């Protein structure tokens, strides 16, 4: 897309071009929690608030197995390896407030 814009002679303001250049070069600071959907954030928040997984499954009208899959996808989206680091990370960025 960047090459297409350049080929078309599109001029970008520094406010737009600088973050874009960082992203394209791989130097952008990525906040992994920004990629979480509303449902992902809820599924992350509820167990941390002490709600049982079986109760969450009823709330979302899904199975415990499906919640497990959501949990695994959340870990992947956030670049984390285990659930043990998930809650402290979420607390540190204010996701559970």
Image (cartoon, helix red, strand yellow):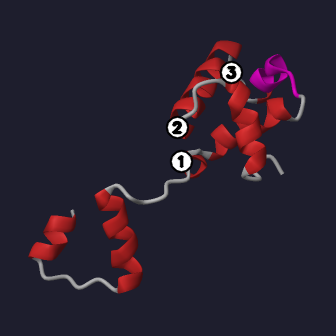
What residue span does the magenta drawing correspond to?
A: 51-58
Q: Quadrant of residue 53?
A: top right
Can you identify the residue that label 1 sits on? 35
Q: Is residue 53 magenta?
A: yes
Kindly indicate whether the residue at mark 3 contacts the one at mark 2 (C-beta within 8 angstroms): no
The local secondary structure at tag 3 comes to: loop
Kindly indicate whether the residue at mark 1 contacts the one at mark 2 (C-beta within 8 angstroms): yes
Can you identify the residue that label 3 sits on? 62
What secondary structure prevails in the magenta region? helix
Q: Quadrant of residue 51?
A: top right
Can you identify the residue that label 2 sits on? 77
Report, in whole angstroms, how far the alpha carbon at label 2 lies from the one at label 3.
21 Å
Residue 65 seen anywhere in this rendered image of the structure:
yes
| As drawn, 15 above or below 71 | below
| Quadrant the N terminus occupies | bottom left
| As drawn, 10 above or below 36 | below
Q: Residue at x 63, y 26 (%)?
A: 71
- Front disc: 2 or 3: 2
x and y percentages locating residue 95 in the rendered image:
74, 49
Task: Pick whichever, 69 or 63, lies toward us.
Answer: 69
The local secondary structure at tag 1 comes to: helix
Counting residues from the N terminus, which is met first, the one under dot 2 or under dot 1? 1
| As drawn, 92 above or below 19 | above
Counting residues from the N terminus, which is met first, the one under dot 2 or under dot 3? 3
Q: How many other residues sit within 10 Å of disc 3, few (<14), some (14-19) or many (≥20)?
A: few
Q: Quadrant of residue 66?
A: top right
| As drawn, 81 above or below 1 | above
């Amino acid at each position: 897309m960047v090459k297409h814009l350049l080929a078309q002679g599109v001029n970008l303001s520094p406010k737009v071009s600088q973050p874009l250049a960082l992203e394209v070069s791989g130097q952008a600071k990525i906040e992994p929690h920004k990629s979480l959907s509303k449902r992902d954030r809820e599924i992350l928040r509820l167990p941390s608030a002490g709600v049982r997984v079986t109760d969450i499954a009823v709330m979302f009208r899904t199975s415990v197995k499906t919640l497990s899959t959501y949990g695994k996808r959340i870990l992947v989206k956030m670049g984390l390896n285990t659930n043990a680091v998930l809650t402290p990370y979420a607390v540190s960025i204010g996701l559970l407030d």
